[in-house]
Image (cartoon, grey):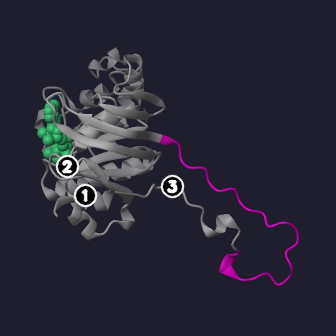
Amino acid sequence: MEHVPVQNVATPSAVGARPGGSEPDHPQIGPLVKAPARAPAPQIIGARGLAKTYPNGQAVFAGVDLDIRADQRVALIGSNGAGKSTLLKCLIGLLPSTSGEITTLGERFLAAPTGAQLTRLRRQIGFVFQNHGLVGRQSVLTNVIQGKLGLKGSWRAWHHALARQEWREEAMAVLAEVRLADKADARADQLSGGQAQRVAIARALIRRPKLLIADEPAASLDPAVGRDIMRIFSELAGEHGITLVYTTHDMQHALDYSDRIVALKDGRVHFDRPTARVSPRDMEGVFHG
Ligand SMILES: Nc1ncnc2c1ncn2[C@@H]1O[C@H](COP(=O)(O)OP(=O)(O)OP(=O)(O)O)[C@@H](O)[C@H]1O
């Protein structure tokens, strides 16, 4: 397994290089002042020695170490059954791990978080799954406002008519970001698959999450719509400074919309690298061979 952590690397200018790279005409006067190296971005997810075996004896992965920092867009890849969803759920405390230690958004836990930790985690995380999970008979606006459920004072989020005016305004703003403001009054079950997934993104964004988790968000969409959804994810996560972790078994979705790719294979992290350094051959190695 090759592990190449992605960190902020000091640029030449940050370590005192001269513009144009020329030598000084005169001896240096005074000490060479080094600009301080940028501190690494805050840790969002850390895992050490993580393993998961389901109660029926199905061993999924072992020895997983992971360090995801703020503002990264991470694609978690692997073939069907490689354990992507299981790993994602363990990292955010939705599934207990069998051994190892996890620190997500400052909450440190073994196996599973406490109830209080889970509540705090949920408040800071936005979720989007393959099946968008909208309430079909309710309006798009109500579905988006329901993204506030679980946050403080959120009983008002059950219906847009109960919601505070500022929440309705926020919902309209996030709907505009996914280019669906004109559908606010439509019933959710009248939307196409791609539109429904955009509403699911808006519903996640209204939580103002630090971390956005997407499990195969484009898997059930046709290719063009799937690319559109991935692009929206990637751009909005970047614009809002949200750390994005998504699973996919589409190689192109991993290459085009992430800064870093973590590949799972045979129950291990097969590689963990900046996307720019992942070759087509590396990808082939994950899914074949
Ligand atoms: N609740 C469960 N009990 C037992 N085994 C499970 C359970 N859920 C998943 N598994 C098994 O764990 C393994 C990993 O499943 P997981 O869904 O995490 O993989 P994945 O990489 O997300 O797959 P896919 O791309 O098909 O969604 C598979 O062999 C699966 O059958």
Name the residue that disc number 3 marks: 7
Decide which of 189, 60 is in the foreground and name it: 60
x then y, percent, for residue 281: 25, 70
Span highlighted in magenta in the image = 18-43
Seen at 68% across and 76% down, the residue is 19
Seen at 24% across and 55% down, the residue is 228
x then y, percent, for residue 85: 23, 40
- 222, above or below 163, in the image: below
Tag 1 near tag 2, CB within 8 Å: yes
- Which numbered disc covers residue 218? 2
Q: How crowded is mark 3: few (under 14 residues within 10 Å), some or many (20 or more)?
A: some
Q: Quadrant of the N terminus?
A: bottom left
Q: Report if residue 206 lies within the magenta region.
A: no
Decide which of 75, 266 is in the foreground and name it: 266
* Mark pair 2, 3: CA separation: 28 Å
Decide which of 142, 8 is in the foreground and name it: 8
**Secondary structure category for the residue under label 2:** loop
* Mark pair 3, 1: CA separation: 22 Å
Q: Report if residue 35 lies within the magenta region.
A: yes
Q: In which quarter of the image is residue 189?
A: top left
Left or right of residue 180, residue 92 in this image: right
**Secondary structure category for the residue under label 3:** loop
Q: Earlier in the sequence, mark 1 or mark 2?
A: 2
Name the residue that disc number 1 marks: 253
Single out the mark in the foreground, 2 or 3: 3
x then y, percent, for residue 182: 25, 41
Q: What residue type is labelled 2?
A: Ala
Tag 2 near tag 3, CB within 8 Å: no
